Image (cartoon, rainbow, N blue to C red):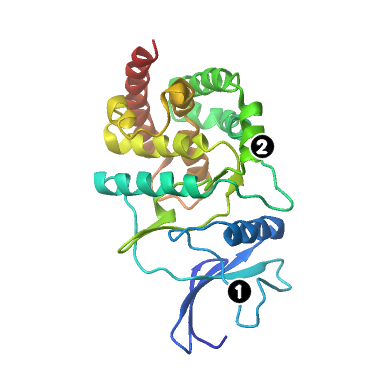
Amino acid sequence: MEAKKIHPIKRNIYYIEIASGEKYVLKGHSNTSNMRQQWEFFERIQSRNVVPFERYPNGKKEITTGTNYSWTISPYVSGRKLNYQTAEDRKRVMILLKRFHAEANQIYVKKLLRKQPFYKRWHARLYRFLETEQIFERNGYLTLYNDISYMMKKYLEIVESYSWYKEQLDAERNGSWVHGDVASHNFIQNEKTYMIDFDLLHCTPQIYDYIQLGQRFLPYINWDIETLLGYDMVEDVELEKFINSVFIPSDLVREWLHFLTRKRRVSIEDYMETMELEWISRKEFLNKAKLILK
């Protein structure tokens, strides 16, 4: 494979054009077991919307270097990322996700990699959030901190009481998979909509993708419960579980923790002011949604 152009996208991801004109994404994986599970999944799923790995010209699935990375190639898909601000893109992702979930059934791999249930991962996120109490206190936002902490603890307790263990066993028995990261940048639009980046792919109840998607939609639909339910993300029997899971402010906490670790474009005080405004909207959504659950 003779590369005539190589352009870095991220530290371990490169855009490559080869001499014959084909375009690829070269990606380095630090977790080889995860990468190989993705390979097995791609070989078994029949989908025209999933962007899979491809073999190198010599037939190899991966190249391992001395940098602790295993490198794969995927076809480069030209297009734009979806934008959840627009109703049309929200509709596109719903259509694609429903199709993907139908296709990502009865898929079995040799050695299944299990992940902790999402609510346990969110518990770990809560513990990291609790360690930032002093930052809120120093900036005069202790009430906001207490409110978020209380709400997250309360709804995690509610959500973890559901029968997730049985549903996990059912998902494994049925070979049902989720994408695991339904952020808008993982969907590429040209004439069709494509799904990329399967690093968080795992075999688990498919409601997890919709819980994540519901949280991502809410800021763009004015925190309106009726609009959210209009997307028919889940069956009526799962509605209570879905809404209570969406209540958990794990996404708010995730973004806060990301903000603390990356290069800051705004001050902590400005970020907290925006965070507080979003929290007010979120609580209004919570109160309206409670009426629906009654």
| Outermost residue, top side | 294
Going by the numbered disc 2, the residue's amino acid type is Gln
Horizontal and vertical percent position of residue 207: 50, 34
Q: Quadrant of residue 35?
A: bottom right
Question: Eyeballing the image, is 287 above or below 248?
Answer: above
Question: Eyeballing the image, is 32 above or below 209?
Answer: below
| SS of the residue under disc 1 | loop
Number of marks in picture = 2
Going by the numbered disc 1, the residue's amino acid type is Arg
Of the numbered discs 1 and 2, the one sitting upstream in the chain is 1
- Residue sitting at 62 percent across and 44 percent down? 175
Q: Give the Cα distance between marks 1 and 2.
A: 31 Å
Which of these two is toward me, 100 or 151?
100
Q: Nearer the viewer, mark 1 or mark 2?
A: 1
Q: Quadrant of residue 232?
A: top left
- Residue sitting at 46 percent across and 49 percent down? 100
Q: Which residue is mark 1?
A: 55
- Residue sitting at 52 percent across and 20 percent down? 155
| SS of the residue under disc 2 | loop
Q: What's the mark number on residue 116? A: 2
In the rendered view, does 171 fall on the left or right side of 207? right
Horizontal and vertical percent position of residue 34: 67, 55
Horizontal and vertical percent position of residue 130: 58, 28
- Residue sitting at 34 percent across and 53 percent down? 82
